[in-house]
Structure formats: C-alpha cells, structure tokens
Amino acid sequence: MSALGAEPAAGSWLDRFHAVCNAAIANPRFRRFAASFPLTRPIARRRAQGVFDLVSGFVYSQVLLACVRLDVLNLLAESPKTLEALSLRISLPMAATQRLVDAAVALKLIARCSDGRLRLGSVGAPIAGDAGIAALVEHHALFYADLRDPVALLRDGAREDGELARYWPYCANRSGEGFAPERIATYSRLMSASQTLIANEVLDAYPMRRHRRVLDVGGGEGTFLAAVAARWSHVDCFLFDLPPVAERAAARFTSLGLKARTLTVGGSFLTDRLPLGADLLTLVRVLHDHDDDSVMTVLRAARAALPSDGRVLIAEPMSETPGAETVGDAYFGFYLLAMGRGRPRTPARIGEMLVAAGFSRPRLIPTAMPMQTSVVVAEVATP
Ligand SMILES: C[S@@+](CC[C@H](N)C(=O)[O-])C[C@H]1O[C@@H](n2cnc3c(N)ncnc32)[C@H](O)[C@@H]1O
C-alpha cells in the first residue's frame, strides 16, 4: 500500500492494460454500451452470465442434489417420462416436480422430447448411472456445511469436529487405529466409486508395459490396481493402506479372482516401511491430502522401497492446471482446507519434492482430462 492507502500502479504493460479493461468493465455506463453494441453484446452477455453463475453456484448444486436424491436422472435414463409419470415415481407433488424439472431443464440435466416427455439432458447424461458422481454429490452436503462461514474457515482453519474432518478420519488420526469400520467403509466406497474414471485416465496416459510389479500406496479398496491388472496381464499388484482399508482391498481382490496376482499390506506410510519388490510405486489421490512434512515422509519411504531402476507415479488433480484451475485451486483448495490437512500442489512443486526425496527427471505426463487428474512420473535418482 502507498502512503495514501492506494495500491501502486501495476508494473508491466499487460498489468496496466488489464487495469484499464477492469476500470471500463466496472463502469455501469460502459457495460450498458457493451450490452447494446452488436459486436460486444455476445461478450457482455457471456460475462454477465459468468458472474451470475458464480453467484448462483450453490443453487445449481442443490438442484443437482435433489435430482440425485430423488433418482430423477436414473429414472429418465430408463426411458423418457411424462411429468405425471415422473411425479408418481419420485413421490413429489406435481407442482414441486414441475419446479424441479424446470430448474433441471435450465441446467441441461434434463431435456424435453419433441412430444413433451422428459429425457436426460446433455449435462445429466454423464451423471446418470455414475455411482461415483452421485456419491460425490451426496457427500458435498458435508463439505457445504463446513463452508457455511468461509471467512471463519480461512481465518481459523478446519474444526476437529467439522463434517469433512470426521468423514476422513485419517486426517486427525494418522495411525488408522481404532477407526469405526463404518467410517472406513464410507470413505473407501466413495473413493472406489470415483476411481474408475481416474484409473482409465492414468492408464491411458502411462503404459505399464515395462513394469513387472506395481505398489499402489494409499490404494484404498484396490480399484486402481484392479484396473491395472485388467489392462496389463503380466503385472503383479501390491497394495498398501491403513490396516482396515487394506483388509477391504484383500476381500475385493479375492472376489475379483485376483488373489494370486495381488498382495495387500496394512500399515501407515507415515511410520512404517513400504513393502519391497515393486518397480513402479503409485500414489493416486494421496499426496494432496497431506501437509508438506508428511508428503516428504511418504516420498522418502517410496524412494526407499524402490530398486535403482524404479519409478514413482503421482496422480491427482493439481494446482494451476491450464483449463482446470477451478478444480485444483478453487475446489480442492477449499475442500482440503475444510478437511483440515493438505493442499493442491503444482506439478512443479511436486517435482521439487520428488527431487528432494531422491528422485530425478520429474515430468508431467499429459492426460486427456486434466481436471480429473494430472500425472507426474519420476525415476529413482542414481547417486
Ligand atoms: C483420498 S484416498 C485415495 C484412495 C485411492 N488411492 C483412490 O484414488 O481411490 C486416500 C487413501 O490414503 C489412505 N491413507 C491415508 N493415510 C494413510 C496412512 N498414514 N498410511 C496409509 N494409507 C493412508 C486412506 O486410507 C485412503 O485409502
């Protein structure tokens, strides 16, 4: 701040250009002109819509929550329905169904057929039948409860009895001992349901032809490794997670007929050694849950578990990902704040931490959908 309390003029010509543009956009007379002039009208409308969407995002997400809770999208995926038929199936009065349908049509969750019946819309189609998205939407009720006072959350951090802190018990209790099985099951199911898309992204981006054994650390119920085993028949799979989670993974591998190709080990990557024998170690949606000191502990443990030709693969949504900034920086930034631990990191920051832990050549591997996950791979550094 200058002596007069005003910000000094920004430095580069680009900063000054943006300052002039922002001053113009902030001026109501300029906005009226831009909205009426044919060449600027589409831009003005898009910008105004963007502002409105930002202001109204919570309402939109609650319309989606109502559709998920009432199973509207799956019902319409079965077959198009009249308003009356839908109202009967979701046990909601006609007027309320009409209101929900109008909102859902506006959000493209639902669309109207030419004969007036209701069908899935272009936004609803990928959500219908995806148990992972439904579970994610449902558990957002907890996240939004923690976000009720965002300034207090920023100022004071997450409360130990916050909804997300309780949902993810390992945030408060690092050893995983004494967790109620139902709490483990709840978050493990959510992770498993949302894992399939991630696994395909990672496996499309990083072929595992050269690897013989993959150790997935923080591997949850084993959904990622099950996808590895299905795609690469020569690869054996090791999973490491907190003991009660590793037990769930073992049961899952057995039920999938993968017992002979898998090994599950229970423990804490913050205090225990990781199993030896893998030439690729994966950390999928794990590092962002932890603060820097814990991440360094995990990465050093990973380095110690790998042979000299080993590699490590980190997959998670990352900060400053072009085109997906809202996911890494806004959504995960606040999600992890509410959870009480961790942060989204840039690929460069993850690379620095990998090098500090004894890896070399960290590189970003392009994925088709960086908003779901980015992938960084590094090699064990040779002395
Ligand atoms: C966000 S979940 C991701 C699970 C899985 N990799 C996926 O992407 O679906 C984080 C996983 O790390 C595990 N985890 C957390 N703290 C751990 C610790 N100290 N030691 C071992 N595993 C831990 C959790 O139990 C959970 O399965």
Image: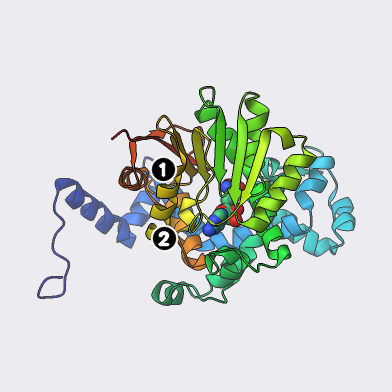
Query: Regarding mark 2 in the picture, which secondary structure is present there?
Result: loop
Task: Please give the label number shown on residue 303.
Answer: 1
Above-or-below relation of 322 to 168? above
Q: What residue is at 48 percent from the left and 58 percent from the top?
A: 270
Task: Please give the label number shown on residue 9.
Answer: none
Q: Residues within 10 Å of mark 1 (few under 14, many from 20)?
A: many
Q: Left of 35 or right of it: where is 164? A: right
Q: What residue is at 35 percent from the left and 50 percent from the top?
A: 34
**Residue type at the position of mark 1:** Arg
Near-viewer residue (257 or 91): 257
The answer to whether the residue bearing label 1 lies less than 8 angstroms from the nearest atom of ligand 1 is: no
- Residue found at the very far left of the displayed protein: 3
Q: Mark 2 to mark 1: distance in Å?
A: 18 Å
Q: Quadrant of residue 297?
A: bottom left
Q: Quadrant of residue 215?
A: top right
**Residue type at the position of mark 2:** Asp
Q: Position of residue 252 (x, y in %)?
A: 74, 44
The tag earlier along the polypeptide, 2 or 1, is 2
Q: Left of 79 or right of it: where is 41? A: left
Query: Regarding mark 1 in the picture, which secondary structure is present there?
Result: helix
Q: Point out the image quarter for the C terminus.
A: top left
Q: Position of residue 226 (x, y in %)?
A: 67, 36
Above-or-below relation of 234 to 321? above
Q: Residues within 10 Å of mark 2 (few under 14, many from 20)?
A: some
Residue on which the image places disc 2: 291
Whether residue 325 is visible here, answered yes or no, is no
Q: Left of 162 or right of it: where is 383? A: left
Near-viewer residue (180 or 189): 180
